[in-house]
Amino acid sequence: MPPRPTLKIAEIFAGLQGEGLRMGRPSIFVRLAGCNLRCSFCDTKYAWRGGRAMSAATIAAQVKRLGRRKAGGWICLTGGEPLAQDVGPLVNRLRHDGFRVQVETNGTMPGPGDIDWVTISPKPPDYAVIPSLRRRAREIKLVVSRELNLSVIRRVRAEIPAGVPIFLQPESNLPESRAQAVRLVRKTTAEGLDDIRLGVQLHRIYGFR
């Protein structure tokens, strides 16, 4: 019998979603190891390498042990970059077990078609998102780093379907990044750009996972 395919997993834990439209809602997080980018402002650099090899069945069993109530029915696949690995079998397994699946991705790689909620966080220097993911986005998160400016936001807004909100999320809630985010939101509002919102990392404010 051939060996079961495995995924490299950095950690699995129950917590609250700290960002975006699902902010404050319970979820179980499956953090995959490995990333195709190396952003200087990344707050999970420990997930760039390593990870424990786990099968989809083993991951699903650990998720079930944490319990549906702790998840609120939701699983969030995050990273690193979760779509750098073949998460299709895991998504199928989790959905078969009655969970809905959110994926947080940088938007540079395709993913399976049955993901319930696609959160895209385009990254510098080019902030590229592949067309197949643009059409599936439920929300966009742009980290307010030194690279982010009004022209980048204009381009991302033009590429993403109308009605999909774009959150400007301060880098690690740093004061200078918060101030920059407010300025950018005001400028985009003055320009009439659609649905640009101020974001935050709620888990850094409250200290939860």
Image (cartoon, grey):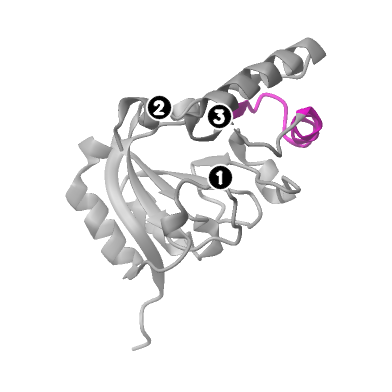
Q: CA distance from mark 3 to mark 2?
A: 11 Å
Q: Marks 3 and 1: in contact by CB < 8 Å?
A: no
Of the image marks 2 and 1, the number of the one nearer the N terminus: 1
Residue 163 picture location, percent across and down: 67, 24
| Tag 3 secondary structure | strand
Q: What is the number of the mark on residue 41?
A: 1
| Tag 2 secondary structure | helix
| Magenta stretch bounds | 150-168
Q: Amino acid at mark 2?
A: Leu
User: Crowding near pointer 2: few (<14 within 10 Å), some, many (20+)?
Assistant: some
Tell me if residue 26 comes above or below residue 79 in the rendering. Answer: above
Q: Residue at x 58, y 49 (%)?
A: 40
- In the visual, does 66 lie left or right of 101? left
Q: The C terminus is located in which quarter?
A: top left
Residue 131 picture location, percent across and down: 74, 48
Q: Residue at x 29, y 57 (%)?
A: 60
Q: CA distance from mark 1 to mark 3?
A: 10 Å
User: Crowding near pointer 1: few (<14 within 10 Å), some, many (20+)?
Assistant: few
Q: Nearer the viewer, residue 146 or 205?
A: 146
Q: Marks 1 and 2: in contact by CB < 8 Å?
A: no
- In the visual, does 201 lie left or right of 123? left
- Splitting the image into 4 quarters, where does residue 147 fall? top right
Q: What is the number of the mark on residue 170?
A: 3
Q: What is the number of the mark on residue 202?
A: 2
Q: Nearer the viewer, mark 3 or mark 2?
A: 3
Q: Nearer the viewer, mark 2 or mark 1?
A: 1
Q: Nearer the viewer, residue 56 or 173?
A: 173
Q: Marks 2 and 3: in contact by CB < 8 Å?
A: no
Residue 113 picture location, percent across and down: 56, 52
